[in-house]
Image (tube, coloured by chain):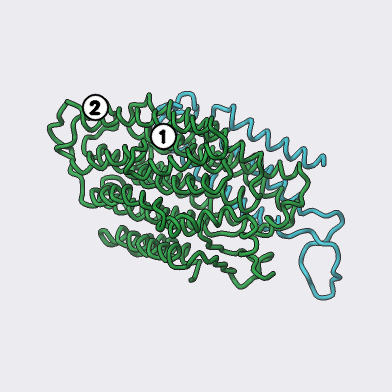
């Protein structure tokens, strides 16, 4: 249970960063932290104490195994996050070229 | 019918555009219009000729608890027709509109990826797969919002991407909780296991899904990204985003998950009612004060999504019929209004209502179709918007929720006021316009005329006889909660 709570705390750190930081790069990092917290939670869900890796081999006994599905899901979600982060960084670069700053209080062509 | 074609055709078109079609002038536009036309044909077939049958395709031959199924029921077919129809008109409109921006093959390739993602969301029968298709559609949408390459477009796109990252994380957590509680990700299996879960787990799952999906649908407290993103995108993309993307990723998934999977829990239906009423009123109040035409339309999208949520939250068959009908109608008239905004922006070079003038002589098609769309969205009788709003209001009174009916009526009056302002200043003011900057192409006129005609024709869907044929199967698919599990899992 403690692990899940720590995981949730990590998620809240990311959310706090997105809400309060004024620097584009820090916002991107915060969204990354939020993603890591979710991935960590997925891996924790599949974890079994003293379990083996989930691959059947010749001569290996069928014993308690780690649940492989969350691991597959985490791989997918990491790839998606990579794509989103790359896009965010590209947008931040273009914004820097236009405004010469990373400070979102100075990037305010749009209201609301 | 082979279900994966709905996803394969747009993806293959995107691939072929980047590979080959871009080398020829107009090749990428022709290929994407062809793909969208084929998809419209297939979805007409799926909606009208399958007689409400539910098709399940097991990808790779893996049975349901292991593999990822694609499911086509009447609700999916209804939404598929809407998405592909708007995509086709949007592509026809883009043909003349997008030429003055960047090299256009990138635009068409991204558009096809957006379409593939949306069709995937509508067809999938697996919770994690739903998330993946959502992200595919969203990544294409971020790039398309920033397509014009001006500074405020990058700003809107960045805001949109960060908000979408938050909502995706919330949805991913809810998927983790669902998997931890039920050990399955297939929607039908989750629906089977869900009533047996502990009440606090049900609340966690519902609450996380509601927060994540409301962010995608831009319901009122979660709306901050929408006016920027939808008003900064190129006009045909604004039409796609406002007309179908928020409905596919937000409203359709809310309906599918909360009705067919979670079994329409009363607490969340009440949450829909309250969120819907708040969105209707605040969205329209913020819209009345806007002078930027596209921003005004974007705020109206929030308000109209409120009507749909109100109809969903009533939990009655009539309310759901009104909500689904309004989803379709809103896609038609809101896309038409965004095309009008795009045509005016191309003709006059401005989106500010105060700088427009009397356009009835120089741009007759735009001016007259904008009148049709304005009357539709404000709910004036012969047009489709009137009938869907009327159904929602009657359903609210019948469900003993007269307060929410009052919200809907007041919202409709304010909508009428704000569109009178649009017509008064934007299209029919006293100040004449002498000359246009550039001419409106034939494709743009064609797209606007098609949608204006459909705005009138779809009001026929309320006539008994046509209604049983067009609208009722989709409503049945939503309201029949146990039916979804039975139909998808078959004899298992």
Picture residue at 63% right of the left edge, 55% below the top: B481
Q: Left or right: B172 with respect to B406? A: right
Question: Going 26% across and 45% down the picture, which residue do you hit?
Answer: B100
Image vertical order of residue B24 relative to residue A59, above or below: above
The part of the image, by quadrant, that contains residue B386 is top left
> Residue A89, can we see it?
no
Residue topped by disc 1:
B300
Of the chain colours in the picture, the one used for chain B is green
Front residue of B159 and B298: B298
Occupied quadrant, residue B364: top left
Image coordinates of residue B355 in percent, x first then y, are 24, 27
* Residue that extends furthest to the bottom in the rendered view of this protein: A58
Q: Looking at the picture, how far across and down is residue B329, in whole percent?
A: 40, 46
Judged left or right of residue B183, residue A20 is: left
Question: Dots 1 and 2: beta carbons under 8 Å?
Answer: no
Q: Secondary structure at mark 2?
A: helix
Residue count near mark 1 (Cα–Cα under 10 Å), binned few <14, some 14–19, many ≥20 = many
Give the chain of mark 2: B
Chain in cyan on the image: A
- Label 2, on which residue? B355
Instruction: Identify the element where label 1 is drawn.
Output: helix
Report the Cα–Cα distance between label 1 and label 2: 21 Å
């Amino acid at each position: 249970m403690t692990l899940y709570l720590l995981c949730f705390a990590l998620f809240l750190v990311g959310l706090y960063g997105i809400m309060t930081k004024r620097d584009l790069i820090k916002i991107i990092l915060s969204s990354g932290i939020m993603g890591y917290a979710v991935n960590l939670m997925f891996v924790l869900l599949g974890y079994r104490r003293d379990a083996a890796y989930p691959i059947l081999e010749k001569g290996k006994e069928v014993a308690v195994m780690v649940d492989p599905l969350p691991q597959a899901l985490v791989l997918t979600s990491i790839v998606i996050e990579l794509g989103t982060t790359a896009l965010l960084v590209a947008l931040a670069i273009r914004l820097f070229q236009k405004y010469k700053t990373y400070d979102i209080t100075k990037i305010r062509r749009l209201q609301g | 019918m082979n279900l994966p074609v709905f996803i394969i055709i747009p993806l293959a078109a995107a691939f072929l555009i980047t590979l080959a079609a871009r080398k020829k002038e107009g090749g990428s536009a022709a290929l994407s219009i062809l793909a969208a036309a084929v998809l419209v044909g297939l979805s007409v077939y799926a909606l009208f000729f399958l007689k409400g049958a539910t098709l399940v395709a097991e990808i790779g031959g893996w049975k349901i608890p292991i593999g990822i199924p694609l499911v086509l029921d009447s609700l999916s077919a209804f939404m598929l027709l809407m998405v592909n129809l708007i995509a086709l008109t949007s592509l026809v409109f883009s043909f003349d509109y997008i030429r003055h921006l960047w090299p256009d093959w990138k635009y068409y390739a991204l558009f096809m990826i957006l379409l593939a993602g949306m069709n995937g969301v509508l067809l999938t029968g697996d919770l994690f797969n739903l998330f993946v298709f959502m992200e595919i559609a969203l990544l294409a949408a971020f790039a398309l919002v920033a397509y014009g390459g001006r500074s405020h477009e990058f700003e809107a796109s960045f805001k949109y991407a960060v908000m979408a990252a938050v909502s995706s994380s919330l949805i991913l957590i809810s998927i983790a909780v669902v998997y931890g509680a039920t050990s399955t990700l297939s929607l039908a299996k989750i629906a089977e296991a869900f009533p047996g879960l502990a009440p606090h787990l049900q609340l966690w799952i519902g609450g996380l899904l509601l927060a994540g999906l409301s962010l995608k649908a831009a319901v009122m407290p979660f709306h901050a990204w929408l006016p920027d993103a939808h008003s900064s995108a190129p006009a045909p993309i604004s039409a796609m985003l406002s007309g179908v993307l928020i409905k596919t990723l937000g409203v359709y998934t809310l309906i599918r998950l909360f009705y067919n999977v979670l079994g329409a829990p009363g607490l969340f239906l009440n949450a829909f009612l309250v969120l819907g009423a708040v969105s209707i009123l605040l969205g329209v109040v913020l819209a009345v004060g806007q002078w930027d035409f596209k921003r005004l339309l974007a705020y109206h999208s929030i308000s109209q999504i409120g009507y749909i949520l109100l109809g969903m939250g009533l939990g009655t068959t009539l309310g759901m019929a009104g909500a689904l009908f309004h989803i379709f109608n809103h896609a038609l008239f809101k896309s038409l209004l965004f095309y009008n905004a795009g045509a005016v922006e191309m003709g006059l070079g401005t989106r500010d209502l105060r700088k427009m003038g009397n356009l009835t002589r120089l741009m007759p098609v735009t001016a007259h179709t904008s009148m049709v769309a304005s009357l539709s969205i404000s709910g004036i009788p012969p047009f489709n918007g009137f009938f869907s709003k009327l159904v929602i209001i009657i359903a609210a009174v019948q469900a003993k929720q007269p307060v929410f009916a009052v919200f809907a009526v007041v919202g409709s009056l304010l909508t009428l006021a704000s569109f009178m302002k649009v017509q008064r200043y934007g299209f029919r003011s006293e100040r004449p316009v002498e000359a246009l900057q550039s001419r409106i192409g034939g494709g743009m006129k064609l797209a606007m005329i098609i949608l204006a005609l459909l705005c009138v024709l779809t009001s026929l869907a309320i006539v008994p006889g046509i209604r049983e044929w067009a609208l009722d199967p989709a409503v049945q698919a939503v309201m029949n909660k146990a039916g979804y599990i039975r139909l998808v899992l078959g004899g298992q």
